[in-house]
Every structure is written in C-alpha cells, then in structure tokens.
Image: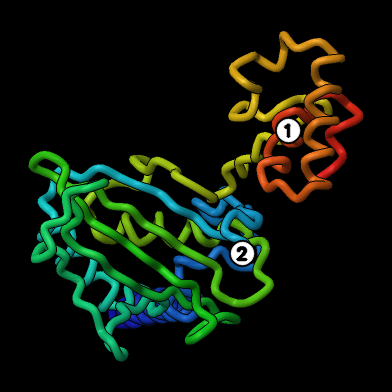
Amino acid sequence: LCPILEDMARLLFAFAALAGAAVATEQATGSSICGDDPTKVSDCNHADLGSCGNACCVVEVSLPAAPTEVYARLKEVLSSGIDGTFEYVTGGDPSPKDDLRPYKIDQPKPFQFIVQGRHNAPQYKGENGDILDFNIAALGSGSSLRMFSLSRVHGALGDAGQNFKTLSFLLQNTQLAPSSDFTIVHGCGKAIGVSTAISKGAAPAELSVIAGVPVSTLSFMALASVALAAAAAVVTGRSWAARTVRAGASSEGLLKAEV
C-alpha cells in the first residue's frame, strides 16, 4: 500500500508543478496579449489599421451599474494590473481629478468620471505602452462607459487586434458586462470613413446656388458670363471675386482654378 501512496504523491506533485508552470507562463506573457499568432487568441480578430493615425479602438457599452460603481471597479481592476500588464495612470503636473461631477456637465452627455490607464506588452511597455482612456456618463439609473485604446509607439499603423483585445479583456475582468455587449464607435478594424470628395465638374452642395439661381438650371453661357465677370473682378482686386469664381465653377473648364 505504501508504494502505491508514494506513487500517487509523486503524481500529484508533478501535476501541481505543471499547473504552477502554466500559471507562471500565463503571468509572464499576459493573457491579454495577442502575441505572435493572434489567430489563436480570442478577441484578437479586430485588427485595426491607422484609424487614429496609429491603430486604435473605441468602444462603448451600457451598464446597469451606477457611475460611482463603474468608476470604482474600473480603477480597482486597472490598479491591480490583472495579468501584470495594466496600470492606472494618475499624477503629473497638473494632475486633474477623475471626478467630473463638481462641473455638472450635461452636454453632450452627463459625464461623471474620466480615467486613464496603460497596457503593456512584452515589446512595448512603459512610455511605449498603449494608452487607455475612459469616460463614464450617467445613463438612466445605469452608466455609459466609453473605452479607448491607442497603440502608443510611433509608427504603429497596425495593431494585429491588440487594442480591441485589451478593452475586451479589461471589461471582462471588471465583471460589469461581457465584451459581447460592446458597440464599436471607431477603429477596431471598422472601415475608416472616407470624406465625400467634390467630383470634377460638380458644384459643392453649399455653393450650388448663384445669385439665387440653382447651378443646375444655368446655361453654359450663363456660367461663362459669371466666370468672366469674376475673372475681371480678380484683376481689379475685388475680394468677392474669389468666392464668385468658386461658386460659378461648375463647368469642367472652370473647376481647375483655385483662387
């Protein structure tokens, strides 16, 4: 019986050693890190490319908890480091307070608290660690939490999904809500908005009327007259001429000049 007990003890010791090694490895690498192969890590599937110049992610989530509770929990989790990669940021000169309630802000939202943190990865930490910003607004009896992560190091056009992963992991650890409740506001791999360009030969919407007459109804001769009058005015130095040229520049031949 004794040899059997000794074998069982050795097996238990071996399992404990393996478990300890696994924990140590997780603490060393950080379970919030996408790592060398993001495809094998959950929530690293929102790779961003240049949404804030550098890669970034902005999400928002509605929570049933009151703003004071959300703030306390968020600050506690950041300060704990969670897996050793997070920090709560404060101090400096000046050092603004997190509590916005004394300012009685109600537009565009009734903001209550603002928080900053940092997320470190093996290669990018300290002053190069990703910047985390949060604001908490009252929403009925609950809260609206906006979360932001920015790849801090210069030249970080892409993030391989790390910014979204960071925010997802953090929210899960607050135990306030699952990350599936996120609404992506900007970045996080969401398509970057493209400004509407003025096509060649088309008048800008805000300049589509000349002297009360829609540009679309003006004949080519009328446009030519406007353009000639504007050109003559430029020669004489009248400042309103530049605006008239722009407004009258809906024919193909006149759009190329920028006065």
Image quadrant in which you'd find residue 19: bottom left
Q: Nearer the viewer, residue 31 or 74?
A: 74
Q: Is residue 206 above or below residue 153?
A: above
**For mark 1, what is the residue?**
198
Q: How many residues crowd mark 1 within 10 Å: few (<14), some (14–19), many (20+)?
A: few
Instruction: Look at 22% across and 47% down and name the residue there.
Output: 107
- For the residues labelled 1 and 2, the Cα–Cα distance comes to 27 Å
Furthest residue in direction right, as rendered: 253
Tag shown at residue 98? none
**For mark 2, what is the residue?**
54
Instruction: Look at 72% across and 12% down and name the residue there.
Output: 216
Q: Is residue 92 above or below residue 138?
A: below
Specify the amino acid type for callout 1: Ile
Q: Secondary structure at mark 2?
A: loop
Please state the horizontal and vertical placement of residue 30, each as a whole percent of the image: 46, 73
Q: In the figure, is residue 117 to the left or right of 64?
A: right
Please state the horizontal and vertical placement of residue 87, each as a whole percent of the image: 35, 79
Q: Return the disc, 1 or 2, that comes first in the chain's sequence.
A: 2
**Residue 218 in sight in this render:** yes
Q: Is residue 90 above or below residue 258?
A: below
Mark toward the viewer: 1 or 2: 1
Q: Nearer the viewer, residue 243 or 77?
A: 243
Image quadrant in which you'd find residue 247: top right
Please state the horizontal and vertical placement of residue 64, each as a whole percent of the image: 15, 43
